[in-house]
Amino acid sequence: MEPKQHLYLVDGSAYIFRAYHRLPPLTNPQGVPVGAVYGYTTMLWKLADDLHKADGPTHLAVILDASGKSFRNEIYDQYKANRPPPPEDLKPQFPLIRDATRAFSLPCIEEQGLEADDLIASYARAATKRGWDVTIVSSDKDLMQLVGKCRDGESGEACIDMLDTMKNVRIGIPEVEEKFGVPPELVGDVLALMGDAVDNVPGIRGIGPKTATKLIQEHGSLEAALAAAPEMKPSKLRDSLIEQAEMARLSRVLVALKEDYPLPVALDDFKLDTIPPDPLAAFLEEHGFNSLLKRLGDGRGSPERRVDLNPAKAVTAAAAPVAGSNRQPLPELPPIDRSKYVCVQDEATLATWVERAMAARVVAFDTETSALDAISADLTGISLALGPGDACYIPLGHGGTDMFAERPAQVDKTRALALLKPLLESEAVLKIGQNAKYDLNILARHGIQVAPIDDTMGIRRRPRDGRALHAPPWPHFAGLQGNLRHGQESHPLRRSPARPGDRICRRRCRGNLAAAPPAEAAPC
């Protein structure tokens, strides 16, 4: 009897963007940007190493998004219309990432007109029909629709699961039900009701994850919930279900994964063999990934050929490092112009900032509170920053407590947090904080679980490519956090201790900000 086959399908597109946002700018010896390539290579290396130790997969392939539009754009021309083009320094890295995959001697699959999710779904379905187990290496919520699908006509233990390598957790049916409140086969119905701001799937306006889950739990399916709407008691929810029923049905089509596409490469060609060292060594040497080359153990690592962690920019070139030192210079940060900051005092403006942050896929955030204790402090406001000079403050609890206190115009706190929650919890948007544990506790008390997240205090201490980073590895993120410090001139990771008289002093020395006008908490 043939031994059990186990196919691993790696969502390579998710790896690319995570690598791009989590690593500093890098250039290879030819001056080509390779930050995302290096991160992708290390992720793939770790995965291959972990899988080898686990001795689990028999077949493996990396699935990528092809450039251009998919068949969903023909169904709905606004699909993903709010996404900006890839950053200029990422574009030349896409072909190199494909080269990296092939350097590991792994199949790299992409198809015009299809998204990676559709190829993954088609391969997973084809594999389970042959009796193979399938593990999808991703944390994408859309792919959770596939979890637990077994061979046609066969029941029992799930044949498809997911592996989130960032959190090092397996995702099976119980984990999907815990996240969505419904089994995997109904996840698409929940997604159709709530929509997806990242992919511009419309859903039904005003329906969030909790309401969508409740409707599907109560009625059993999207169509049943829509059919029951006329019999519901008069409410805004009832009207929305009736008036926007067709948008929900359109959204259901958009979130459905294509499971029957002809396979461009046969499953048997994904058989996992030993990785030949020579192609991988040649790739690593070409791009100056010396620490990885040394790990490969072929002795061809060259300490003289270093990757530039802070390549000079055309406008703001960094100072040259001290000769013989491996410390990177501090980047030149743009001057702080408070006139560019925005005070968000209405829902429309807040919705615009949320949409922009979703499209940018990275946002720095900070909270202002009424006290030092994260357990008892009240949330007074939230700051967001998308880049140097591009930041806003959202006052939520200003105006003091007595009836005569002047209260500035501000968005209702409950409504504001409802608008911010999808952004702060979106797996597609990296959140950057400074000493973020405090902010995470504050937001968790309001039902918001912020993720994924990086903290500049942790970023500073993580070694990259075997070198010490005493300067912040993310000049762009340093600029974001600089915006949130409201006029701070020193570098955010090297600032002098705050003094009670300083305008920049935050909750640690100022105390209750609720009675202060928003302009004293942030530029408004």
Image: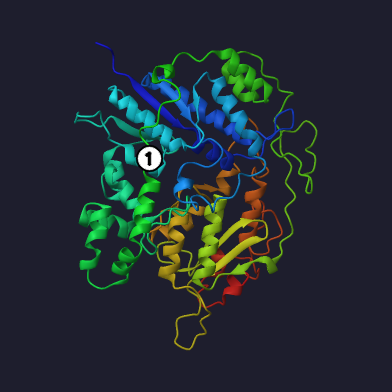
Q: Which sits in the foreground, 461 or 39?
A: 39
Say whether residue 122 is left or right of residue 306.
left
Find the residue positioned furthest to the top: 1
Which element type, helix, strand or loop, lies under badge 1? Answer: loop
Find the residue positioned furthest to the front: 74
Task: Name the image quarter holding the C terminus.
Answer: bottom right
Say whether residue 401 is left or right of residue 459.
left
At horizontal 29% and vertical 18% (from top left) the residue drawn is: 4
Mark 1 neighbour density, 10 Å: few (under 14) some (14–19) many (20 or more): many
The amino acid marked with disc number 1 is Leu
Q: Quadrant of residue 467?
A: top right
In the rendered image, which residue does mark 1 sit on?
257
At horizontal 36% and vertical 32% (from top left) the residue drawn is: 260
Say whether residue 32 is left or right of residue 260.
right
Q: Quadrant of residue 258?
A: top left
Residue 505 x/y as whole percent: 61, 65
Residue 215 x/y as whole percent: 26, 58
Residue 207 x/y as whole percent: 36, 61
At horizontal 73% and vertical 47% (from top left) the residue drawn is: 331
Question: Is residue 516 shown to the viewer in this render?
Answer: yes
